[in-house]
Image: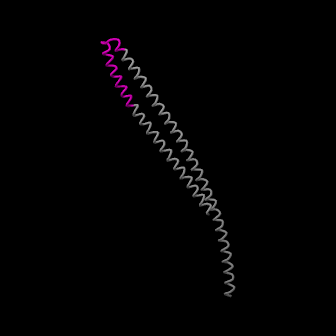
């Protein structure tokens, strides 16, 4: 019985460790997700800035028709710079999304593995409990038979004494 209790405590400790690891991974996912949300927010702000700048560039395009060729060259250079910046921001956003996807996939794999381990441990403990219960029931039946034999002998001796 002590061995069974130790096994149950060990199983509970294993389950507790798995739950702690699961919580750790969930916290890590939450941290990564917060970083992605913050990065997307920055990207959105920068994209708005780029859109604003592009809008201003269009206004400059209308003025360019009336201004010298030098102004046209400056505007086109600014637009190329903004386009390159936007492409870089999009690349960063895509990289952050890829990293989040990998982290989520890894976490799901770890959680699945922990779940499988947990289920296997539960099955093992249940089988052990069932085995112990069977042994205890067999012992109880044997003791009941012995008690019945002792009571029968006692009743027989009592009947002899009474006669």
Of residues 138 and 92, the one nearer the viewer is 92
Q: Is residue 105 left or right of residue 74?
A: right
Question: Which percent across, then down, holds residue 126?
Answer: 60, 56
- Asked if residue 62 is among those painted magenta in the image, a careful observer would answer yes
Question: Which percent across, then down, holds residue 128?
Answer: 62, 57
Prevailing SS of the magenta stretch: helix
Of residues 47 and 122, the one nearer the viewer is 47
- Please determine whether, in this image, residue 138 is positioned above or below residue 87: below
Q: Quadrant of residue 93?
A: top left
Question: Which percent across, then down, holds residue 37?
Answer: 42, 37
Of residues 126 and 58, the one nearer the viewer is 58
Name the residue at 33% across, 22% down.
56
Question: Which percent across, then down, holds residue 151?
Answer: 66, 77
Question: Can you name the residue that lies furthest to the bottom here?
Answer: 163
Name the residue at 44% across, 25% down.
87
- Asked if residue 63 is among those painted magenta in the image, a careful observer would answer yes
Q: How many marks?
A: 0
Quarter of the image that includes the C terminus: bottom right
Q: Which residues are magenta?
A: 44-72
State how the image is colored: one colour
Q: Is residue 7 left or right of residue 69?
A: right
Quarter of the image that includes the N terminus: bottom right
Name the residue at 66% across, 65% down.
138
Name the residue at 47% across, 34% down.
97
């Amino acid at each position: 019985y002590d061995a069974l209790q130790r096994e149950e405590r060990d199983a509970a400790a294993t389950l507790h460790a798995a739950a702690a690891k699961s919580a750790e991974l969930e916290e890590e996912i939450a941290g990564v997700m917060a970083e992605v949300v913050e990065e997307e927010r920055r990207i959105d702000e920068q994209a708005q800035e780029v859109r604003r700048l592009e809008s201003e560039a269009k206004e400059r395009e209308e003025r360019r028709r009336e201004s010298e060729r030098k102004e046209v060259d400056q505007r086109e250079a600014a637009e190329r710079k903004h386009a390159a910046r936007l492409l870089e921001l999009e690349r960063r956003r895509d990289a952050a999304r890829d990293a989040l996807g990998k982290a989520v996939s890894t976490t799901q794999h770890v959680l699945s593995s922990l779940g499988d381990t947990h289920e296997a441990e539960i099955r093992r403990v249940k089988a052990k409990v069932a085995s112990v219960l069977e042994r205890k029931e067999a012992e109880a039946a044997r003791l009941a038979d012995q008690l019945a034999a002792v009571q029968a002998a006692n009743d027989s001796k009592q009947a002899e004494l009474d006669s």
